[in-house]
Amino acid sequence: MNSERDYTAAVQSLNSLQSNFSAVEAIRKQGPGWNQRALPEMRSWPSDFDKLNLIHVAGTKGKGSTSSFISSILAQYLPTAKSVHAERLPTSVGLYTSPHLRFVRERIQIDGRPISEQQFAKYFWEVWDRLGATSPANEEHEARNVSGKPVYFHYLTLMALHCYMQEKVGTAVIECGIGGEYDTTNILEKPLTTGVTSLGIDHVAMLGDTIESIAWHKAGILKPGVPAFTVPQPEQALAVLHERALQTGTELRVVDEHPALAHMRLGLQGDFQRINASLAIAICVSHLSRLGYIAANSTFDRVSDLPEEFVRGLETVHLGGRCETRQDASLNGLTWYIDGGHTLESIEMAGRWFATATTGKQGALRVLIFNQQTRDAPALARRLHTTLASALKDDRPFQHAIFCTNTTYKGAGYKADLVSMNTSKDDVDSLRVQRDLAHAYDEIDPEAKVHVLGTIEEAVVRARELADGKTAEVLVTGSLHLAGGLTEVLESETERAQDSRS
């Protein structure tokens, strides 16, 4: 392949479509609804995406986990899976989620695996060339980057759908980005099934600062006559969801926790994953029924009813950076607990998970690595401390707290797939956010030793120095970008060690 059009070049060109910090701030100041300007541009792409037998998932918390559960369940019905129904679903399953951890191609998966670098480059440049051959209308100009292409997430959405059309996937599971009504993914007109996961306050600049406003936006993915599912929600949010379902011309079903999950070991850790898995079960039952692969009146509401394909899909699913535990490859006794929680609700869930997942060994060193570059970081840190102090019955849940940026490496900076231009470079270079966090945490827990570092790589080194051969439990949270960068540092070390031995 021409090096000017290989995967590396594609990632570099994709990064040029990121909105810089000043542009993001301008968008935030314009308030809710700005994103609707992108939809006409997206809809101008000539293709019948509804052929993909789409499942559309929105929500504040758990939409990535729910989408992964759905994809994993449906994958059990593929001919390569050990399924008595294998002949019934002879094509593949696409999964589009965000953000990614190590590689941008993780966002576009087929049959549970990211597309290859070759596939990514092929479909990236096909979309690039087709867009380059058209000129946006004046009213569409703001939806495009200065290079005349859609901005980062919009571009990837088009590319994912184009990829799935070319690869002829049998079903595509599409996770919303932000909101629903004006989200880029809402160019999907006739999905077979829709779902709304747990709602909370987030992205207030674009969605509003009330649960009712956020529910209104999320319910924008509901479509006339298309089965819609959600989980138990705050009363005000549920009322809005039902009202919008009625206005849209569909019925919204509220899904309670499935009884079979009480004694099942899900592939994703955390008690809260049971409600995500329950929503995934309901969506898959509806979807497979609409496609004619299971009886139209199937419910699988009882423990004994759940097919083995569903059980296997729920138990084998993987989604990195969400309640993930891994042993350090170079230091015995050091365990990493990684969760990308970045809202008040999700950070509380991460704290509860850490409290139940840790060994509880006497004398174990507990270390926090934390960052959140764009939200109210001190508020998140306070919520985490409060949750853990209560769950662990210890007013000092961490002996050390490390605050670092999301920059990957000390010498090389960001890995290309992890470049982020939508935060303030001045803030990152000056460690302003990290110093503010350190000051806030010092007030929360004056006994904890606070460390401020410039990169994730340095935070990993510092955590290992602090462990020094002792049993140590390190919680990494506050941002999926932080979780992804840490995963990159750890896995790159393992890959280099394997290469040196081979």
Image (spheres, grey):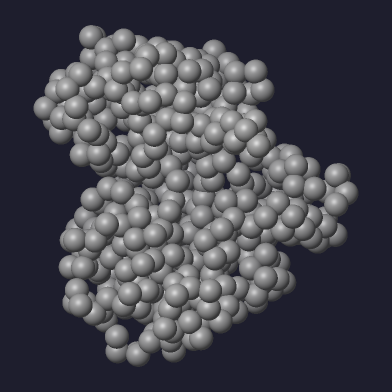
> Is 57 left, or right, of 3 in this rendering?
left
| Total numbered circles | 0
Q: Is residue 44 above or below residue 78?
A: above
The residue lying at 34 percent from left, 61 percent from top is 315
**Does residue 330 show up?**
yes
Can you give x and y, in whole percent of width and height, for residue 163 in the image?
67, 65
Task: Give how far across and how far down residue 428 sits, in percent.
Answer: 55, 20
Q: Nearer the viewer, residue 181 or 9?
A: 9
Q: Can you give x and y, in whole percent of width and height, for residue 302 in the image?
A: 18, 77
Q: Nearer the viewer, residue 439 or 183?
A: 439
Q: Quadrant of the C terminus?
A: top right
At 20% from the left and 39% from the top, the residue drawn is: 356
Residue at 37% in and 42% down: 324
Q: Is residue 316 left or right of residue 448?
A: right
Q: Position of residue 426 (x, y in %)?
A: 58, 18
Left or right: 420 in relation to 431? right
User: Height in image: 324 above or below 273?
Assistant: above
Q: Residue at x 50, y 66 (%)?
A: 173
Identify the residue at the far front of this view.
Answer: 502
User: Is residue 478 among the parts visible in the rendering?
Assistant: no
Q: Residue furthest left?
A: 393
| Quarter of the rendering containing residue 282 | bottom left
Residue 359, quarter of picture: top left
Q: Quadrant of residue 217?
A: bottom left
